[in-house]
Image (cartoon, helix red, strand yellow):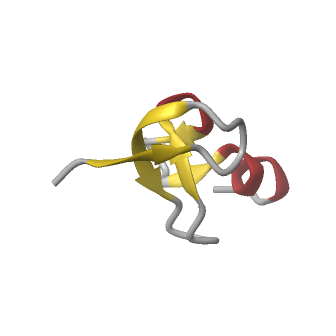
Amino acid sequence: MEIMGLCSICGKPGEMFTCHLCGRIVCRDCYDAANGVCIKCKSHRLV
């Protein structure tokens, strides 16, 4: 199931992903698929 919307980090529209740590809805550019987290969580934690 594909989620569409606006990224909660950069505001870009399109396909969205959910961060497994904070629950933010983010775009592909703001999501680290290998770790399942957004770039904000990745920059604050070692994943």
Quadrant of the rendered structure where residue 4 is? top left
Q: Is residue 18 left or right of residue 30?
A: left
Residue 42 coordinates in the image, percent (x, y): 70, 50
Quadrant of the rendered structure where residue 7 is? top right
Q: Nearer the viewer, residue 17 or 35?
A: 17
Which residue is the extreme one toward the right? 44
Q: Is residue 44 left or right of residue 9?
A: right
Which residue is the extreme one toward the left? 1
- Give the quadrant of the C terminus: bottom right
Query: Residue at (56%, 70%) from the top-left corner?
Result: 23
- Give the quadrant of the N terminus: bottom left
Query: Residue at (66%, 51%) from the top-left corner?
Result: 8
Residue 44 coordinates in the image, percent (x, y): 83, 56
Q: Is residue 4 above or below residue 10?
A: below
The tally of labels here is: 0
Residue 13 coordinates in the image, percent (x, y): 50, 33
Residue 29 coordinates in the image, percent (x, y): 56, 28
Quadrant of the rendered structure where residue 39 is? top right
Q: Is residue 2 left or right of residue 28?
A: left
Q: Nearer the viewer, residue 37 or 1?
A: 1
Query: Residue at (71%, 45%) from the top-left corner?
Result: 9
Q: Is residue 22 above or below residue 14?
A: below
Query: Residue at (61%, 37%) from the top-left corner?
Result: 30
